[in-house]
């Protein structure tokens, strides 16, 4: 993966050396906010709940049900950007969830940043209604 493969709004963070310390730095917070906006943009019709951690994050992606169709959930996570500087783009963990608090979920799968929407849609299709 190269910088040109990264979505434009996240490109400044490719190869970036993040601050480090006991509290999360403002640079990481800006990155995480940009990533959250990107996820919401590429996943229309889904609700994206970010779970902010210390230089890494996870997200619960919800496809709301209606009436007889129950809500469906997918979990997404990136590794610590200080120690794994490109994994936020080229090795993103994505798996199914039985409910919004199912942190063990289905089998781990991985994708690149450009494959998130396809992977989420694929996994949502595997979850029984």
Image (cartoon, grey):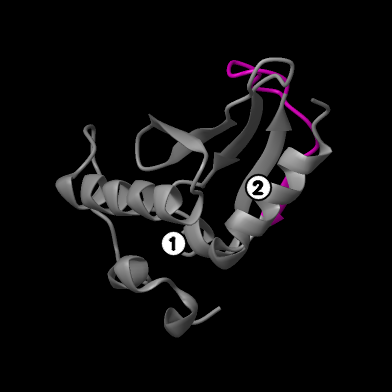
- Image coordinates for residue 35, horizontal then vertical, percent: 37, 52
Residue shown at 79% from the left, 25% from the top:
129
Query: Splitting the image into 4 quarters, where does residue 65 fall?
Result: top right
Circle 2 crowding by C-alpha within 10 Å: few under 14, some 14–19, many from 20: many
Residue at far front of view = 67
Q: Nearer the viewer, residue 54 or 12?
A: 12
Q: Is residue 114 left or right of residue 24?
A: right
Which residue is the site of mark 2? Answer: 120
Q: How many marks?
A: 2
User: Magenta region: which residues?
Assistant: 98-110
Q: Which mark is residue 61?
A: none
- Image coordinates for residue 108, horizontal then vertical, percent: 75, 41
Which residue is the site of mark 1? Answer: 85
Q: Nearer the viewer, residue 125 or 61?
A: 125
Is the Cβ of the residue at disc 1 closer than 8 Å to that at disc 2?
A: no
Relative to 129, residue 27 above or below: below
Q: Is residue 13 visible?
A: no
Query: Splitting the image into 4 quarters, where does residue 34 fall?
Result: bottom left
Relative to 19, residue 74 above or below: above
Q: Earlier in the sequence, mark 1 or mark 2?
A: 1
Residue shown at 82% from the left, 39% from the top:
126
Q: Quadrant of the N terminus?
A: bottom right
């Amino acid at each position: 993966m190269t910088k040109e493969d990264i979505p434009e709004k996240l490109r400044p963070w490719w190869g970036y050396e993040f601050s480090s310390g006991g509290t999360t730095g403002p640079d990481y917070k800006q990155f995480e906010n940009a990533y959250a906006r990107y996820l919401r943009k590429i996943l229309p019709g889904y609700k994206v709940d970010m779970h902010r951690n210390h230089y890494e994050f996870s997200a619960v992606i919800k496809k709301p049900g209606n009436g007889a169709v129950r809500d469906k959930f997918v979990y997404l996570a990136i590794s610590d950007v200080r120690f794994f500087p490109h994994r936020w783009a080229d090795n993103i963990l994505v798996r199914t969830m039985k409910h919004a608090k199912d942190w063990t979920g289905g089998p781990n799968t991985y994708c690149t940043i450009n494959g998130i929407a396809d992977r989420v849609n694929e996994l949502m299709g595997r979850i029984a209604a």
